[in-house]
Image (cartoon, rainbow, N blue to C red):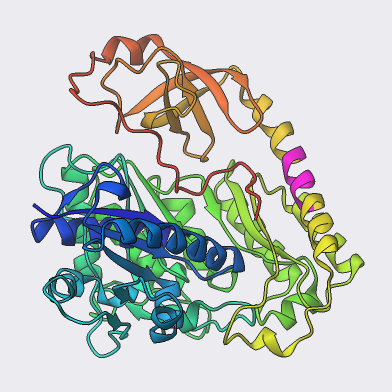
Amino acid sequence: MPSYAIHTFGCQMNVHDSERMHEVLRGSGYVEAGSPEEADVIVLNTCSVREKAEQKLRSEVGRLSLLKRERPETLLVVAGCMAQQEGERLRKRMTSIDVVLGPDNIPELPGLLADVSTGGLPVVRTVFDLDGPRFLQAEPARRGGAPASAYVTIMKGCDERCSFCIVPYTRGPERYRGSDEIVGEIQRLVEAGAAEVTLLGQTVNSYNDPGKGLARAPEAAPDDPDESEFAALLRRIAAEVPALRRLRYTSPHPRHLTPSLIAAHRDLEVLAEHVHMPVQSGSDRVLKRMIRRYTRAEYVDRVGALRAARPGLTLSTDVIVGFPGETEAEAEATVDLIREVGFLGVFGFKYSPRPYTPALKLQDDVPEAEKGRRLSRVFEASEALLAAHLPTLIGRTEQVLIEGRSKSGDECLSGRTRRNEIVHLPGTAALDLVGKVVEARILAAHRHSLQGELTEASRAAARPSERSSPLPLSTPSRRSLPVVAG
């Protein structure tokens, strides 16, 4: 059988797309190789949101080009946002690439590979499915075949047009998936063992059901331009998939954090007590230049209302430093906002010009060294907040969803609380707990995580694992509370 390997760069949408490519290829008779060096087909699923992603792609294609000299029959596929952005230009610059594949063309991958492998010319396929949007869905083969925490795409594309962002160009305009299909996929995942589902979308909370299958959320104001049917979707999932233990979503837009969504967090126990809500800047002038369509005060008011509706909820965010024209005072305003809101995780990035974005018309006038200093201050503020927060949990008993073996080893399983804190449980690797929600007593706080032990009730209920293969590592792609450098 032909074999394949997939290397994923970027966000949760890319991780989800890679999972679908795994299924499409396996369904066409491919088997996963132990390493890229052993594979007949190598897929690089790319990101183009930041300049570093392009550098990583060029480096990886260069390395694999040497491999292809030794094994000319190996096929190299570049998929994802960089493929969509560059298309034919990418293949002309990197002649070792055999297939350039856009995100909407994943179902075509086996056929394209078949054509190229039988003597066909290299191919570029980057066509948006605007007329008939297709959403590849997870197809777990058996009970226990789903991951503990699964992703479900509910929409793709973006209509926001933030001045720094290339996503509308690489993912197209917003297209929504029918709620019947969404609920059906979640039901199958839960039946196959998933305990948690994260809803995915570029602006996930702008969702509207194309099939008109949702009852309007009671708090939804008909004349509010920021309203959507996202809260109604959350309510339908909670009602029709009662076995689902936790529901999350990413990435939302602050202007769609409306009264109906806040009320859903108040009413639905299945919604986790953590929301990732990108803010990007603490300066109104910079937010306006970014075309974010909210002010700092509006952001603070909305997340304040969310916290009031769901006490104990934690927040993380995205921040860009060094946006064109950002002054030192405006950079400090972002640090001040981090402290004011109390974000326990910041995904911080230096501004980098992206092709086709409106911000290219602005002068990138913040020196790279200054961007680095500003980013360091952002991280210092968030690290201090997390360092103050984690010790407050010592002695508490938390509900922890076990995702897999801890990266630290030590026969240790790892999982997350409802607020998204990472908890390591030493001495538990031999127990059959992956995908289960257990009670754990918190014993210690580390820099970015917690250490705990199973309560007596959870340990008594646990059984030895019957797995014949090693436990998976905890999911590395999920947004977590620790600070991540850009």
Quadrant housing the C terminus: bottom right
Position of residue 258 measured from the top left corner of the image (x, y, whole percent)? 54, 69
Left or right: residue 397 versus residue 208 is right
Choose between 202 and 365: the one closer to the eye: 365
In magenta stretch: residue 81? no
Q: Which residues are magenta?
A: 378-384
Residue 200 appears in the rendering: no
Position of residue 121 measured from the top left corner of the image (x, y, whole percent)? 22, 82
Residue sitting at the far front: 70
Picture quadrant of residue 410 = top left
- What residue sits 53% from the left and 53% below the top? 275
**Looking at the magenta stretch, what is its main secondary structure?**
helix
How many labels were placed on the picture?
0
Q: Examine the rendered structure and indicate whether residue 227 appears above or below residue 136.
A: below
- What residue sits 38% from the left and 76% below the top? 95
Picture quadrant of residue 117 = bottom left
Choose between 262 and 431: the one closer to the eye: 431
Position of residue 390 measured from the top left corner of the image (x, y, whole percent)? 65, 30
Choose between 338 and 269: the one closer to the eye: 338
- What residue sits 40% from the left and 41% below the top? 475
- What residue sits 22% from the left and 44% below the top? 146
Left or right: residue 284 versus residue 354 is right
Residue sitting at the far right: 329
Left or right: residue 214 versus residue 7 is left
Left or right: residue 180 versus residue 438 is left
Residue 225 appears in the rendering: yes
Q: Examine the rendered structure and indicate whether residue 228 appears above or below residue 35.
A: below
Position of residue 243 measured from the top left corner of the image (x, y, whole percent)? 23, 42
